[in-house]
Image: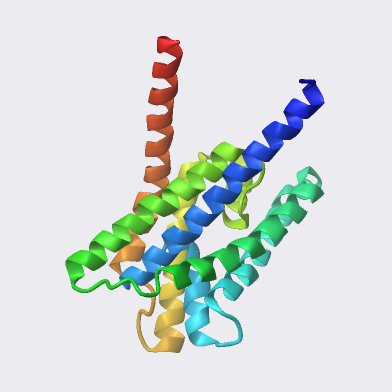
Amino acid sequence: MDTKKLNVLDLIRRYTMFIAGLFIAALGVALSTKANLGTSPVASVPYSVSLMSGLFTFGGWLNVWSVIQISVQVILLRRKCNPIEIVIQTLLAFVYGYLTNFACFLIEGLKVEGYIWQFICMLAGCIVLGLGIWIQLKGNVAMLPGEAMNRAIATVTGKKYENIKIFFDVAYIFVSAILGLCFLGGLKGVREGSIIAAILIGNIIRGYNYLWSKISRKKVYTE
């Protein structure tokens, strides 16, 4: 098999991995929303806005939020910004918005009654969302605008990606809380689950990286 064909097959494999990670992340967001203890930080702002305005669905406002995050990348990276990557990000962001709506539809009939089950559902959402983001990173072909914005900021500042993510997850919760208090009469979509997710998801991604390094090292030793 020639090198060109191998490269195409590898690209297909990595994009397949990325799309799988995209759907898993969407499912994680849907689970977090279903728990009703506050949606995941990355989706908290568009979710709060979707409660304020019926102009778009939750997934639709995710798309609008993605456009804002893409704009931030372009401003930060300037000439270092890859136009092709920006186009791919934009397309995938809209796919992600629709996948989120679809994931919410899939678990619409799921009954989550009682605080314990809500808490378990929220933790499951964090674990699934972290896995989805980690798989996207392993695919290494593209990133969603929110994660790519975190990466761009990490590149410009020299800070670790995981730390940047935790910082912005907390910031998203703060903004969502303000929106809820000012326009919804309370903390709608932002509760203790959002704060827990802000702390956990970056560390969950770090945990997946640790487990993968252990598995990879063990595989090398056994071959």
Give left or right: position of 203 versus 151.
Answer: left
Please give the name of the residue rendered at 42% of the width and 42% of the height, measured from the top-left corner: 205
Give left or right: position of 2 versus 103.
Answer: right
- Give the quadrant of the N terminus: top right
Towards the viewer: 68 or 87: 87
Residue lying furthest front:
1
Please give the name of the residue rendered at 40% of the width and 24% of the height, measured from the top-left corner: 215
Q: Residue 97 in the image: x percent, y percent?
A: 59, 67
Please give the name of the residue rendered at 58% of the width and 69% of the height, measured from the top-left corner: 62
Towards the viewer: 222 or 145: 222
Give the number of callouts.
0
Whether residue 150 is situated above or below residue 173 in the rendered picture: above
Q: Residue 150 in the image: x percent, y percent?
A: 57, 50
Q: Residue 24 in the image: x percent, y percent?
A: 48, 53
Please give the name of the residue rendered at 59% of the width and 50% of the height, measured from the top-left corner: 19
Towards the viewer: 102 or 192: 102
Q: Answer with the quarter of the image where residue 223 lies.
A: top left
Residue 158 appears in the figure? no
Residue 24 appears in the figure? yes
- Colour setting: rainbow
Give left or right: position of 116 versus 22.
Answer: left
Whether residue 176 is situated above or below residue 10 in the rendered picture: below
Whether residue 168 is situated above or below residue 151 in the rendered picture: below
Q: Residue 177 in the image: x percent, y percent?
A: 40, 75
